[in-house]
Image (cartoon, grey):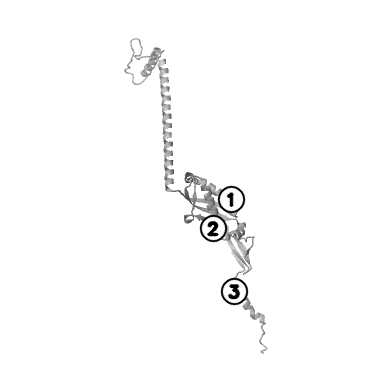
Amino acid sequence: MNPNQIKVPAVAKVLPFIFIIIVVFALIAPPFVIIPSGYVGVKLHLGKADMEELPPGLNFVIPFIERIIKMSVRTHSYDLRGANSINSLSKDGLTINTELTVLYKIKPDKAAEIYVEYGLDYEDKIIKPVIRSAVRDVIATLDSSQVYQERDLIQKKLMEQVSKELEKRYILLDEILIRDIKLPKRVVEAIEQKRRAYEEMQKMKFVVEKEKLEAERKRVEAKGIADANKIIAGSLTKEYLQWKFIENIKSYAEGDNNTVILIPYDQQMTPIINIPNPK
C-alpha cells in the first residue's frame, strides 16, 4: 500500500447515497404541508381523523403515516337550478317549480366533524336534502296566489327553517337567493286577471269618492253663496244706497276722468234699483 494514500472510512463513502435517498424521500413524501388562508386542515393518522383542526400555515406530518385534508371555510354557493330545481305542491294542489342559490360556510372548528360524518361531498349529503325539504314544507302552507305574490315571505320562512337545520350539522347559512318561482301558465293568467280586476275596482272606487266629494263641495259652496246673497239683500236699504252713491260720486269726482257723471237716480234721489222689501 502506498503510504501517501489516506484511508477513507466506509461510512463516509455511503453518506452521499444516504443524502440522495433523503432528498428523494422528501420530494416523494414531504414532511410538511402548507395550508392556505381560508382553509383548515383535518389530519388523518393512519386513516383516523384528528378532531383538532390545523390552522393555515406550515404544518408537519409524518410521511406515509399522516396526511392532511384541506377544507375551505370560505363562503360557498350551491345552486338548485335547472335539472336540480325543486318541484313542490302548493296548499291548493298545484305544482310549483323553485330555483334558488344557497350561500353558506362551514364552521372552522367543526371541519373534522363534518369530514368524519359526511366526507367531502357534504353539499349533496347536507345542503341539498335540507333545502329541498324546507322548500316543500314552506310551499305546502301557501296557496298558489300567495306563492306568486309573496316571494319575500317564502324567502324569510326558508331562511328560518334552513338556518336551524344546517346549524345542527355545523354549517352556517349566509343567504338564500330565490332565482325563480314558476307556476302553471293558466294559474299565472288567472292571478293577473284577478289583480287587474281588483285594480280597476279600486280605481272606480276612487272616482266615485272623488265625485261625491266634489258634489259635497259644490253644495256647500252654493249654500254659502245663497246665504251671502240673503244677508246682502237684507241690508240693501234706501239710506244705505244713498250713502254709498254719495261715496262713489266723491270717488269719481276726485279721479282723472270726471267730465261727465251719469247718475241713475229719480227726482227723490233714490237709485233706480229694485230693492227687495226686508221681511
Q: Mark 3 highlights which residue?
A: 24
Q: Nearer the viewer, residue 180 or 144?
A: 144
**Total count of labels:** 3
Q: Is residue 73 above or below residue 60?
A: above
Residue 164: numbered disc:
1
Badge 3 element:
helix
Nearest to viewer (mark 1 / mark 3): 1
Q: Residue at x 42, y 48 (%)?
A: 185
Q: Residue at x 54, y 47 (%)?
A: 157
- Can residue 37 be spotted in the picture? no
Q: Mark 2 highlights which residue?
A: 124
Distance (Cα) linking label 1 and label 3: 50 Å
Q: Is residue 86 left or right of residue 115?
A: left
Q: Residues within 10 Å of mark 1 (few under 14, many from 20)?
A: few
Distance (Cα) linking label 3 and label 2: 40 Å
Residue 255: numbered disc:
none
Distance (Cα) linking label 1 and label 2: 18 Å
Q: Is residue 169 left or right of residue 189?
A: right
Q: Residue at x 59, y 63 (%)?
A: 69
Q: Amino acid at mark 3?
A: Val
